[in-house]
Image (cartoon, rainbow, N blue to C red):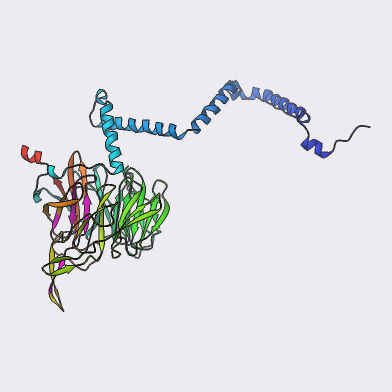
Amino acid sequence: MPKKRNLSDTTNGDKSSKRPNKKWKKKEIEQEEKESSDDIGPGGIDDEEIDSDDINDQEESDEEEIIETSTEKRRRLAKQYIESIKEDLDETGFDAEDIDQDLIAERLRKDVLEQTGRAHRIIADTFSFPIDPGTMKSRRHELSVTCIAIAESGQFFYTGSKDHSIIKWCIKTGKRLHVFPGGRKEVKKFDGHTNHVLALAVSSDENYMASGGSDKKINIWSTKEDKLLKCFTQHKDSVSGLAFRKGNNQLYSASQDRTVKVWNVDELCYVETLFGHQDQILAIDTLSRERCVTVGSRDRTCRLWKIVEGSQLVFRGNTKCATEDGQAFQEGSLDVVAMIDEDNFLSGGDSGAISLWNINKKKPVFVHNIAHGLQTYDSESEGPLKNPYWITSLATVKYSDLFASGSYDGNIRLWKLIDNIRSFVPLTEISLIGFVNALQFATIEDKTFLIAGVGQEHKLGRWKRIKNARNGWRLMELPLKSQNNSK
């Protein structure tokens, strides 16, 4: 009597039990393809010869491309980097024969020094002072200019104002290229700012411009299309500072809500929040490394944030009182900060002192007290009193020995770093009436320019008004000594 095969034999049987079914299915498919070949006609897929070996080779090559060791990746990126250097040298006018190993090596050495913070150009003594005020370019805003951001190429720049607007300008001609209008405070859905614009930044690749203000928003704009790409609303108070990493589209934002936030602008997304300051953060700056430096107003600290390590270094403000004519002036607030290189930075505040810091020391390396002089005001109870002019803005030529400071005493002051970045001395003064709320340096075709954002009021308040000041920006070229000698 023949054995009956149970259900488990049909489902979990050996391979031999499945082979007849597979052959039968294969023959059936071949028969269907043969019958349908007449319908396809010449030129159909059946007329193409597909080699299985070619398919296997292609699959193997795809796998080889996916599997790439870290060494191979570094080698590939290094080759791409060298090719980009050759292209840059080509654009600057070198022939292919002139692009030798020495030029590439020099460029590589310069980039490495800049990234490690050890590059330091001596340029302050190459300029001829004083600067002729008649050579300045200027344009106006309706209200005080509060911030400036310059494209790395130096072709254009942006200004933000208390009138809620942002304007794009051409540096060479001074012409207005585009206006990003502001809206009224009560407007909820608006592609722009509905309160004072306080911070601007342009990415190194010049594809993005970021703006922040008293409406607590960070807007990301396309610089090529001049349109809004994204609006971030995670901050709980005014956005007071913005900075893009050099060579990267990572954005850092500082806010009066006491936090620093990190953003990935390529992906238009939020990354993380950093906590530490005990008061409003009023300014932020960064360079190539994944770190940034901030100042925290009345907590009187500067903080260096190491993003990767998730740590921070705290630098306490100048605790010594500056004395003048028997009066002592205590530092009450740190308001502005600017990085010189990866290891050194400057800060300023309401005591009128400019402090020079090194990240390896907790105390200032050097302090210049009452950098912009004293002002006299009448006190109802004590009579005439003197107070220092606040430091309202700082700007550095990165990786060099030149920087500028602004206040409301009627002058922008240029300074020279000396003694291997252990001190600094005054170079010259540039007459300018009004609150100098923003300063930025720009380099265009071996020419160095200084752009100042000026207003009748301080960018964060209305406690003082300089009526004869003009709201707008001023552009001045720093003339080289060789240019003046040739004239």
Residue at image position (60%, 23%) is 52
Q: Taking 12 as reference, is 275 left or right? A: left
**Residue at image coords 43%, 33%:** 71
Residue 434: percent from left, percent from top: 16, 60
- Asked where in the image residue 155 lies, by quadrant, the reply is top left
Indicate whether residue 398 is drawn in magenta: yes
Nearest the viewer among 266 and 162 is 266
Where, by quadrant of the figure, is residue 38 drawn?
Answer: top right
Q: Quadrant of the N terminus?
A: top right
- Viewed as shown, does residue 334 lie left or right of 220? left
| Quadrant containing the C terminus in the rendered view | top left
Q: Is 443 on the left-hand or right-hand side of 87?
A: left
Q: Which residue is drawn at 53% across and 31% down?
A: 63
Let me know if residue 210 appears in the view.
no
- Looking at the picture, how far across and down is residue 319, in whole percent? 24, 64
Drawn side of residue 137 relative to residue 275, left or right: left
User: Quick check: 315 above or below 476?
Assistant: below
Residue 426: x and y in percent read 13, 52
Q: Can residue 283 be seen in this view?
A: yes
Residue 83 occupies quadrant: top left
Q: Is residue 134 magenta?
A: no
Q: Which stretch appears magenta?
A: 384-412
